Amino acid sequence: MMKVNDIVELRIDRMSYGPAAVGRIQLPGEPRAMVVFVRGAAPGEQVSAKLTKNNKSYWEAELVEVLERSPKRAEPPCPVFGRCGGCQWQHLSYESQLEAKAEILVHQLARTTKIDEAELRTKLTTHAAPSPLGYRARLQVHGDKKGIGYFAESSHKIVHTERCPIAHPKIQAAWTEFVTKRPLAEMASATGQYKIEWSVTDTGQVSEAVNRKHGAFGFTQVNPEQNTVLAGIVAELAGSGDVLLDLFGGDGNLTNALTGKFARIVSVDSFNEGEDPTSLGGPLASGRTFVKERVEDFLVEKRWLDWGVERPDCIIADPPRNGLREAAGRTAGLQAPRIILVSCDPSTLARDLTAFTSSRYRIGRIHLIDMFPQTYHMETVVELTAY
C-alpha cells in the first residue's frame, strides 16, 4: 500500500496536459497499474519520486532523482525554472515539446469523439514557433522592495529574477531598466507588492502600466508571430462567401484578413465596443458589423433572422478556455456549411466537437499552433464541414 512521502521508482510514459509527466506503478494484487503524475520528469525516463497526494484514481509526486535520463530532456534556459509559476516544460527539448502536445491533443480528441487516433493524426498539422524563446510580447510581473518576478505556482510569493527567457527582447530591456532605475522600496511601501504589465505594440514600442487593471492595453495575443500563423490558417479554412459569423470575435483578430472575401461579417462578443444588437433592424449592411452581446444570448435570440440572414456561409468560433458548452449545439443548429472552431484547451475542444459530429458535421483539417513554447498550453484550429 502506497502512502504520502513514500519514495517510489517508475518509468515515465508521456507528458500530461499540465506540468507533470505520467508513469505507472503495478501494485501486487491489483488488476490495473496506478497512474502517477510526476512534476519535472521527462518521457522515457526511469525516476524515483516522492508521493505527495492521493487522488484515488491517481497519485501526484515530486521528482527526487533521474535514474535513467531521457534524450528528450534539455537544460532549462531560465535560472528560476521549477520555482517560477510561468513555464512548465523548459526541461524538454523544443522538438519533444511539440511531439508531446500533438500526442496530448490526438489522445484527448480520440477519447472523447471516439474517432481513431490514426485517422486524427492524418488530419493534424503542427506549426512550430519560429522563436521558442523571446516570443512573449505581453506579460505581467509582480514586485516588492527586493525586486520583481513571477508568482510561484498557486501562490502570491514572488520568485525574483533578473530576466525571463520567453520575454520579448524589448520587454527584457524594459524589465532591466525598471529594476535599475525605479525606487522599488518606495513603490512597495503602501501594500508591500505592486504589479507591472508590459506590452510591445505593432510599431515595436513598449507600453508599461504599473498597478493598473490587467489588460490595461487591451487584449492582444502574447505571440505575434504565431498569431499571424493562426489568422492565416483561419482565413484559408473559412474561404469566401456572403455572410461570415464571428463568435467571440473580440476586435476581429481572426477575421480582419477576411474583409473583402465575405460581403458581410458579423463579430459578436460581450467585450467589444460594438453596436447594441436590438438597434440593428432591417437587412444587414455590407461590410463589417461588431455586435456587443453575449454569444449565448445572440444564439438564443436568433439575431441573424432579424437581418434577413437565414444561415451564414461560415462560422468562426473562438471561445474562452471553458469552451462553447451549450452554445456548441446552438451553433451547430445554424447549419452553416463550414465551421472553424478555435480552442486553447484540448479537453473542452473535444467535448464541444461531439456536439458537431453528432449534428451532421465531420472533422476536416486540424491545426496545432504552438502559441506558448516552454509551457503545456496550445492553440488548436479544427475545420468542420456539413454533410
Image (cartoon, helix red, strand yellow):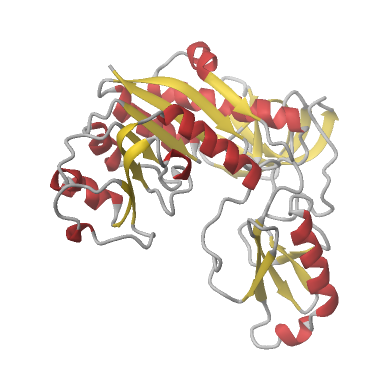
Left or right of 294 on screen, residue 307:
left
Q: How many marks?
A: 0
Q: Could you tell me residue 277's position as x and y percent? A: 22, 57
Please give the name of the residue rendered at 47% of the width and 39% of the height, measured from the top-left corner. 343
* Most foreground residue, 9 or 27: 9
Q: Quadrant of the rendered structure where residue 67 is? A: top right
**Residue 106: horizontal and vertical position, in percent?**
52, 23
Where in the figure is residue 16, as x and y percent of width and height? 60, 33
Q: In this view of the protein, which residue sits in the foreground, 189 or 199?
A: 199
What residue is at 75 percent from the left and 23 percent from the top? Answer: 44
In the image, 275: left or right of 195?
left
100 vs 299: above or below = above
Determine if residue 9 is in view. Answer: no
Residue found 40% across the figure and 21% down from its top: 363
Task: Classify residue 60 as left or right of residue 256.
Answer: right
Q: Nearer the viewer, residue 365 or 92?
A: 365
Residue 81 in the image, given as x and y percentages of width and height: 78, 50
On the rendered image, what quadrant is the C terminus found in? top left
| 171 or 234, nearer to the observer | 234
Q: Quadrant of the N terminus?
A: top right
